[in-house]
Amino acid sequence: MSTPLFFPIAAYVSRLSGSGYLSLRTWCEQAGIRCQATGPFAERPIRLRRGRVFSIVAEAAPSSRVEIEIPRGPSAQAAARLLIAALAYSLMDVVARQSIRGVAWARLSPGAGRPRTGRAKTNRERQRELRQRRLLGIMLQ
């Protein structure tokens, strides 16, 4: 699993109520990573709901409650990983970003045009492929 490229924009409300909130530290443990912070920022209350759409609702304060709704389907660990990635890249939570930094599942998938070596194709390689496609097109006619 890799991290999605885009996350939904968070909706901010004045107050979130209800129960079932767990700390960011607990979500990190469920995701199988170590929380990279201590103190009140690691104890941020977060609730995960299973629903039909991917959405994020947060209180309008930096270290306040957050409610993330994800579609049904992923396992508990995959849901926890998606929750932490959403915190890191949608709400720009520094603790979540530091916690998933360097983890293999948090990397973005490579683009479609890149070779497996990780380097971009040279102009010579691109031109050779274009000529081969053109030649193949002429032969098929």
Image (cartoon, helix red, strand yellow):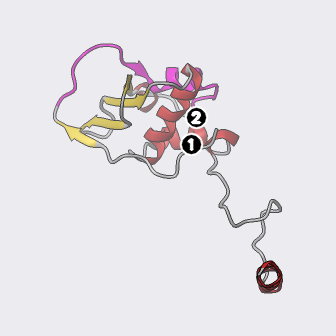
Placement of the N terminus among the 4 image quadrants = top right
Q: Is residue 119 left or right of residue 41?
A: right
Cα distance, mark 2 to mark 1?
A: 6 Å
- Residue 63 x/y as whole percent: 33, 35
Closer to the camera in the image, 129 or 120: 129
Q: Earlier in the sequence, mark 2 or mark 1?
A: 2
Closer to the camera in the image, 67 or 73: 73
Which residue has dot 1 on it? 98
Question: What residue sits 79% from the left and 81% below the top?
Answer: 122
Q: Amino acid at mark 2?
A: Gln
Q: Amino acid at mark 1?
A: Gln
Element type where label 1 sits in the image? helix
Which residue has dot 2 on it? 36
The answer to whether mark 2 and mark 1 are in CB contact below 8 A is yes
Does the magenta-highlighted stretch encompass residue 30? yes
Closer to the camera in the image, 119 or 63: 119
Span shown in magenta: 15-35
Q: Pointer 2: residues within 10 angstroms few (<14), some, or many (20+)?
A: some
